[in-house]
Image (spheres, rainbow, N blue to C red):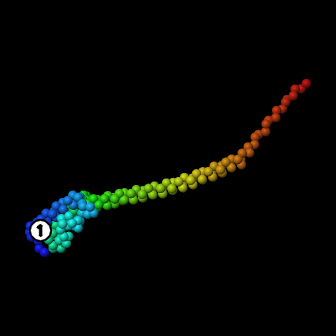
Amino acid sequence: MRISAAQKTENENRIRAAMDRLLRGEMPPGGKCDIKTLANEAAVDRTAFYGTRTYAHLRAEFERRLQALQQAGDIPDPHEAQIARLKAENAKLKDRLAKSEQTIDELTDFRTQALARLAAQHEETVRLREAALGTSRVSRPPTPRTTVIGTCS
């Protein structure tokens, strides 16, 4: 079924208005920033956007504008923005977890080395004490005898 020029112009105006709303981030409930939602919002058959159909040039314009926004870092679809934010947060958390695991490994190694050193020091202390007790038989020189030198009478 062919549409008149006036109907085509009216449809294009509705499509452009819906396109602007979607690219500003005004999504309908359950909608995304895509051709399907654009067609639903403009009340136009989605197949009219593909191939050499009536509104294929508007699909190309929509995709070009959407890509330009995404390259500029602006994601109009709140759902897609949330996904991008969560992916970035997930990457940060994975990095943080890896650093924490590395720190735990380093501290575990340090603890093991410290315990080994303490055990070695304890053994050395025990050995030195035993050696000191074993040689503690210090002989004292005998006390000198005092001789009385007698007086001769």
Q: Is any part of residue 147 visible from this angle?
A: yes
Residue shown at the point (23%, 65%) measured from the top left: 37
Question: Which residue occupies 82% across, 35% down?
Answer: 145
Name the one closer to the observer, 93 or 83. Answer: 83
- Quadrant in which residue 51 is drawn: bottom left
Horizontal arrangement in the rendering, residue 119 relative to residue 14 (left or right): right
Instruction: Check the image and name the residue furthest to the right.
Output: 153
In which quadrant will I find the N terminus? bottom left
What amino acid is at disc 1?
Answer: Lys
Q: Position of residue 110 (x, y in %)?
A: 51, 54
Q: Residue furthest left?
A: 5
Number of numbered discs visible in the structure rendering: 1
Above or below: residue 119 compared with residue 145: below
Q: Report the residue that reaches farthest toward the top.
A: 153
Q: Residue at x 87, y 28 (%)?
A: 150
Mark 1, secondary structure of its residue: helix
What residue lies at 15% left-to-right and 73% top-to-bottom?
52
Image coordinates of residue 132 in percent, x first then y, are 68, 47
Rendered-image quadrant of the C terminus: top right
- Direction from residue 106 to residue 58 in the image, left or right: left
Q: Nearer the viewer, residue 41 or 33?
A: 41
Q: Is residue 61 visible?
A: no
Q: Nearer the viewer, residue 138 or 59?
A: 59
* Residue 69 % position (x, y): 22, 60
Q: Quadrant of residue 62?
A: bottom left
Q: Residues within 10 Å of mark 1 (few under 14, many from 20)?
A: some
Q: Which residue is mark 1?
A: 8
Residue 46 on image: x %, y %: 20, 70
